[in-house]
Amino acid sequence: MSRRVVVAGGGIAGLAAAHRLVELNKEKSLGLEVMLIEASPRLGGSIATEKIGDFIVEAGPDSFITEKPWALRLCDRLGLASRLVSTQAANHKIYVVHKGKLQALPEGFFLLAPTRLWPFVQTPLFSLGGKLRMAAEIFLPRGAIDGDESLGAFVRRRFGAEALDRVAQPLVGGIYAADPDQLSLSATMPRFKEMERSRRSVILSMVSEQRRRARNRETGSGARWSLFVTLAGGMQELVDRIASRLPEGCVRLNTPIVELIEDRDKKLWKVTTGANKSHEAEGVILATPSFRTAELLRGVASGAADDLKQITHASTATVSLAFRQEDFPRPPESFGFVVPAIEKRKIMACTFSSLKYPGRAPKDYVLLRAFVGGILQPDLFQDNDVTMVKNVRAELAALLGVTAQPFFSRLCRHPNSMPQYVVGHEARIRRIEEALNGFPTLALAGNTYHGVGISDCVRSGEEAAEKVINHIR
């Protein structure tokens, strides 16, 4: 028998794990057989790109962050660096829905707090009392909380309720589809916790950081790429390129795993798939959603399985619509807008895809993408397709004045796709990892553990591959 490693799950984490196994196999001449097993009929998980004429429509993630280097490095190794595309600088502005109208996020406002005085003073997003409360953060002492804290509690404590309700909640909700009062600060945005610890004031720390970045730009030592990048032909390019680098016969689609058993005598894993077909493997990487991973680990590590079952998920949907530019009373000139939950509307956010990245739509057309559902509005995800598209169009008519029939629409659903990093998440993940310490040739990967973004998933897949390789006999 060849030395086999099975990767379960063909999303970006599983693909990154399989690709890294192939790389290490070649580098170290290990004689491995890599088997990537995916239950669905396609690879990529939530990543999927559809080309409609000259439009590029993303079903799921449309980009990845460059401050976390793992996806960038993978693209470089795959020969995709020349295909990377930065955001269009002219449209960096972001809007927030406030009292039924779009208001520009003040220049220099970064997620939680302002870094520039005059734009902050002028914005109608906050009342005078709200602005004074936020400005008072400069004088507040460090917090006394040593353990985990919710993002909502942190923002209220440092900046007040208006900062949370009107800006922090919708911006963070767009990333995690989460309730900030449940979201773990240390698991999602530890940077702000560290700012408070090291500099006391988050605002002063952020101002210092902004000045450092400005100096880097002036000296030409800034980042080569924008904060977010995509691929010229859409994120599907990343999936397709990885798949093309895997050995022939490596991928098994439409193949759900039904059981995982450890054979301690042989020091092997027995992986059983549909039709009661078994595969022996020296190593296994589970890049499946946490609720599936819990089922597979039930007979292997019940403690880890119990903790995995406790992780909740949010469901989201995207509705992409194409309009002619002339359909807009005023041409949009930004990446899009976010919608605070207190506005009680039927979308979480909307991205102007064709303004965020070049080449997403033909000239004289605008491609929009609205987001529906999340942990705060789960009922909206349950709407049927016709109702959901109708609601999105109604919101765009109210907020943008677009009442014309769209050139086309595409609705994509992602059920249970966003694991919720609630308070205590890091402690739970530590317990899971400790419970699996006795299984060195078993590794977990995916957006459940140490980050939900594409770059985080790439990192988790590659680290899982390296762990298994290092411990294979």
Image: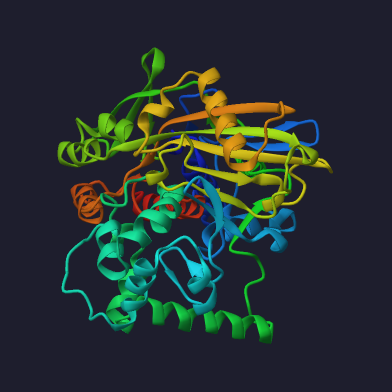
Q: Residue at x 82, y 40 (%)?
A: 362
Residue 438 appears at what percent x and percent y? 20, 48
Q: Is residue 236 visible?
A: yes
Q: Is residue 446 visible?
A: no
Quadrant in which residue 171 is drawn: bottom left
Viewer-proximal residue among 74 and 407: 407
Is residue 412 found left or right of 417 in the rendered image? right
Q: Residue at x 32, y 78 (%)?
A: 136
| Residue furthest right in the image | 363
Asked whether 195 or 399 is in front, the reply is 399
Examine the rendered structure and indicate whether residue 274 appears above or below residue 94.
above
Q: Residue at x 40, y 12 (%)?
A: 275
Is 358 positioned to the left or the right of 30 in the image? right
Quarter holding residue 361:
top right
Say above or below: 89 vs 288.
Answer: below
Farthest front residue in view: 128
Name above or below for residue 101 compared with residue 164: above
